[in-house]
Amino acid sequence: MPEPVAEGVYALSFLRTFHNIVTDQTLKFEDKVHSLLTFGLQVFELDIAIISKIQQHNYRVEYVACFNNELAAGAEFPLGNTYCVHTLKAGQALAFHHAGESEIATHPCYQGFQLESYIGAPIQVDGNSIGTVNFSATKISQPFTQQHIDYIELFAQWLGAEIARRKTIEQLEQNNQTLGKLEQAANIGTWQLDLTNNALEWSQQTKIIHEVAQSYQPELATALTFYNEGTSRQTIQQAVEDAINSGEGWNLELEITTAKNKLIWIATQGSAEFENGKCVRLFGTVQDITDAVELKNMLARQKEAAELMLNERSKLFAKISHELRTPLNGIVGMLNAAMTEQNPQELKQQLTVALRSSDILLSIINEVLDYSKISHGELKLEPSHFLLKDVFNDLTNLFTSVCTNKSIQLNSHLQIADDVAVYFDSTRLSQIVSNLLSNAIKFTEQGAVTLSVVACKSDKSAEYVDLNIAVSDTGIGMTAETITALFKPFNQGASNITQKYGGTGLGLSIVKELIEMMQGQVSVSSEFGHGSTFNIRLQLPVGSVQAQTHITDTADNEIDLSSLAVLVVDDNEINRIVMTSCLSQFNINADIAIDGKDAVEKCRAEKYDLIFMDCIMPIMDGWQATQVLRADKLVTEKAIIAALTANTSESDQLKCEQAGMNLFITKPVQNTAIKNALASAAQAARNSADQSAHYQ
């Protein structure tokens, strides 16, 4: 219990003590608050002093002073359970000296804490009550006078003003920090030129931008030398003269070279100040906008690239549309002619042209699909073990007849050991060389096309094979301009070349992308009118190839394919007709199923040696059907299930293998693929029969 001040404490004494507390520069705000609360306990002769913070219906003790430490800062109560709810409602100071005999005797605060004496006032900031300052005790005090009310309101007013001031200072400090960060982030400096004495001043940030020391003293003549000679310096000199003569300001983007020889872009703004019609001062800002200029230039380049890509896509659609129509015209025209042709020899020739046109059409489609995959980053290499020489022997055999038909010679020089095996994507390697050979033959009217291949163990690592490929021709050759744009899509050189020889112009672009995926190199040398030579260098991982059993034509003839039980599963009627027609050439009368569910029912009734299974079908697809056939043992272990699909990715092949399919055949289906599938099924059936005979 504090010792009361002597009765009749004079207002002057109170104000002097109050003033000494609130003006003491050595005290922090928290110390001043504690001193005021302690002083108030003496003035009001009470036990507890509180500064509260009110948020909605919550009462929080922010500061407290009491002699028995029965209450601590941070305590919270429902606002309705405190006397302060009446103070806030009244909006002014309120006091009770004997609460038990007043209208608040039923208040929860009196019921719970038996507080008899209370005096408090609301603390207002910006016209809003944010809390209260109040003093209380469980004892009955002397009645509070108007002087006491004035004292408590003075406490509240100072607290409100001080809290508002601190809030303003904090906001200003925060704003200053934010402004400083923004200026630093924006890299903006200021400058001013006093024309009465030609004194030039740079701010700290301006000096940083120019990369000079903070002690550097700029002058007008030397300041202008930072601007690059030529347009930038002439522009700023003219802007300064115009501002001095006419008061016209400037807002320019110019290049400067800093004191450390760094080339940057700045945005400089300037204004003029006049007195009595004479310019006395220039002032403005300077900002480093190098990043913004570079971004703008990058966006301009991207826009140009996007427009170029859009133009290339337009070329693609026009080119592909034209190229597709040519083989389609051959297919449709020859088939229409064959419908009424009576001469067997003419009919065969017409069908041959239709087949050749279909091969051209398929080649165009494959090129477009490959280019699309490359453009979207979806093309992946699919390596396997194979004998390297086999690939080039096959290509030589394939293109020899093509050259013969065109009356030119194909020379093949293969320096590859018979046992050199590699682990690589044989399909893509063959595609690259095939594309180069096709181009060489296309653009060669007379003379020869030469394929030279050298393969040897790498000098750097025994785990790799160095492969050097050269495809040369005696054809029309190329100009330097054509070579520069050679590997760009849709480009075939001069328009007359494109019109004469046709093609999509995607082939060499695909070749370049594939070689880059293989981390190889491709180069070309050519002389207009005297042929071209393409050189490729690749490094292939060493592989291993075990002895394989090849089914030869003789072996095929020894196997009676007509005895095979074959099922064709496809939801498309035309596809079923095509497959059954192709199988009939091998004396096979195949059964058909219209979807996976139908195939399962067919296999419940009969055992098949070979099933051609379409993958994408309604009701039950080919993968699901295969899983059911294998799981329920509706086919024998030796039965061959061949996937038929237009999807050729590695993931599609893996999905078919996981479902239980043995072979993977892509659409459109070639007779060779059908023949190989039949031979595999016949071989499996014969092995199964031999095994059964062995156990009998």
Image: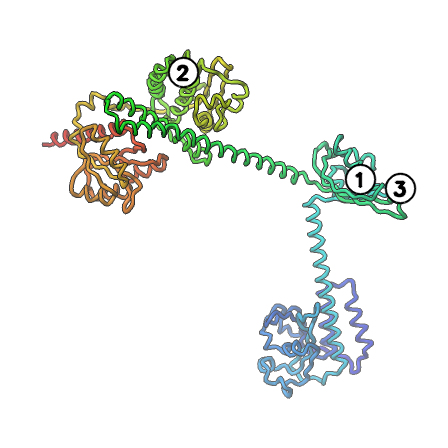
Neighbour tally class for label 2: few under 14, some 14-19, many 20 plus, Cα within 10 Å: many
Q: Quadrant of residue 82?
A: bottom right
Q: Is residue 80 left or right of residue 8?
A: left
> Closest to the observer: 361 or 679?
361
Q: Which mark is residue 451?
A: 2
Q: Residue furthest bottom?
A: 101
Mark 2 and mark 1 in contact? Answer it, CB < 8 Å.
no
Residue 197's tag is 3
Give the SS element for disc 3. loop
Q: Report the Cα–Cα distance between label 2 and label 3.
A: 83 Å
**Count of marks, rendered view:** 3
Which amino acid does the dot numbered 3 rest on? Asn
- Residue for point 24% across, 44% down: 628
Upstream in the sequence, badge 3 or badge 1?
A: 3
- The location of residue 580, given as percent across then percent down, is 22, 34
Q: Earlier in the sequence, mark 2 or mark 3?
A: 3
Q: Quadrant of the N terminus?
A: bottom right
Kindly indicate the quadrant of the structure image that contains residue 650. top left
Tell me the amino acid under the disc marked 2: Leu
Residue indicated by mark 1: 215
Residue 693 on image: x %, y %: 11, 30
Percent of width and height locating residue 481: 55, 21
If you read the primary sequence from the N terminus, does the residue marked by circle 2 or circle 1 appear first? 1
> Element type at marker 1?
loop
Q: Is residue 494 above or below residue 171?
A: above
Q: CA distance from mark 2 to mark 1?
A: 73 Å
Q: Position of residue 254 (x, y in %)?
A: 72, 36
Residue 501 shown left or right of residue 262 in the figure = left
The type of colouring in the image is rainbow
Q: Is residue 40 left or right of residue 80?
A: right
